[in-house]
Image (cartoon, rainbow, N blue to C red):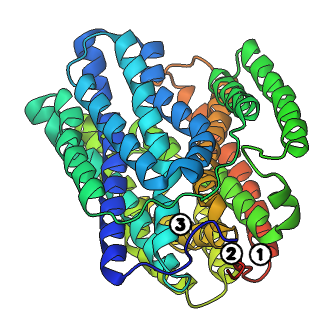
Amino acid sequence: MPTQSTEPSPIKDRIIALSIISVSSFISAFSGSAFGLAAPTMAAELNINTPELSWIMTIYLLAAAMLQIPFGKIADNYGRKKIYLIGTIIFSLSALVLGFMNSATVIIIMRFVQGIGGALVFATGTAILTSVFPSDKKGLAFGINIGSVYLGLTVGPSLGGFLTYSLGWRSVFFSVVPFGIIISFLVVFLLKGEWKNETKEKFDWVGSIMYISTLFLLLYGLRSLPRYYGYGLISGSIITLVAFIVWELKIDYPILQLRMFGSNRFFTFANLAAFTYYTATAATSFILSLYLQNVHDLHVTFGARIAYIAGLILLARPIFQAILSPFGGWISDKMAHQIITTTGIGFGIIGLSLLTFLKADTPLYIIILSLVFGGIGFGFFSSPNANSIMSSVPRKDYGVASALVGTMRTVGQTISLGLWTLLSAVIISDVDTQSPNYEPLFLKSAQIAFIIFVVIAVLGLLISYLRGKNNFFKEPAD
């Protein structure tokens, strides 16, 4: 007996669902990128030190990464619309509270709470779209939604800078609240359906604790490298991962159905492709931001305006991502995902390869071209790959599969930044940016990093191709 109706929703309901979730995705992305620009001003005003600011910046991602899978399972049992609404409310209320805070400790706590809200939203948004759109329209829906994320990332720095300059850093948090209220009302009164399993499965508390512990140890360990306890934390994550796998394979209702990975190559390789590609690319913008501001001749030409100029240059990738993601999603409804996603990674590899020869006088057009290739790559990869993952599982697992999409992205991004942190700590160490030794050491670190990222991306390309042809899950008849 199927757990949910397999009838596609009416066109009006699909448009409403896509509009709500895309606006919410835009706001989440905008909030994160805008806060990144406002954070230094906040730190200066509240006398927040560097370690505290680092926690404020990363605790949100840590919470979102750890909790998406458990929340995805809860959403499958109790209703994806309900969990999405709760997440939207938590995210918005925490933004409101953050706008009034003056203590670094309280801000860190509230950023964790906001990460909980984000995890609830991320775990269910893609699942809701998968539930309301028919199989031949899912890719386009994913593309529009992912395009809205990149649009938020594109306008976040510039609009966040304007808000911070005009109204102060608190306005970045306050700007989210009206949208959260509107989205909550739209979810309650216009979003039709609940999308939950008819039969609730027993929730795997033990597995959830093991899963959360594994990700916490891994991500915090990566953040702590190269300090000695960072390696200890990563070693601990391996132990808890093994225990998690053993536990999940022996119980009837696991938090994560690991047997799916063994029996469904299409699903498994799509997730691995996402993980490797995000690992290979996530640190690119951060490294180039440091390069443009501290090493390239631009910092001599533009002086105090260099951060603004660097920000404009770095817009090249998210602009192309935002433009091409809907097209990539649309075309994934027409042809094999294997071809589109592998092509996307191929473009990304070209962009990364251009950066392996980075020098102090590398022409600016090379940097922009690498970002453009990266944007094209993500435009053809992200939404078709999400379509692969969501189309290859039964409806009862949409919540967990949706959470996996976000988790692969978040963990990949964290490991990517962790690799750069380790390289820069070992090679650059504590050399000041004003030191004559900084430039050659930075360039050496960047070149090694991009070579590693190219290797990882090539691995991702092979994995993407080896997924095979489309393998969509067919729900059994009533």
* Label 3 to label 1: alpha-carbon separation: 16 Å
Q: Which mark is residue 132?
A: none
Helix or strand or loop: what does disc 2 sit on? helix
On screen, 216 above or below 379? above
Q: Closest to the observer: 203 or 429?
A: 203
Numbered badge on residue 465: 1
Crowding around mark 2 (Cα neighbors within 10 Å: few <14, some 14 to 19, many 20+) is: many
The residue singled out by tag 3 in the image is 378
Q: Amino acid at mark 2?
A: Thr
**Mark positioned earlier in the residue sequence (3 or 1):** 3
Under circle 1, the secondary element is helix
Q: What is the crowding at mark 3: few (fewer than 14 residues within 10 Å), some, or many (at least 20)?
A: many
Can I make out residue 396 in this image? yes
Q: Residue at x 86, y 42 (%)?
A: 251
Do residues under tags 1 and 2 come within 8 Å of each other at their CB atoms?
Answer: yes
- Of the numbered discs 2 and 3, the one sitting upstream in the chain is 2
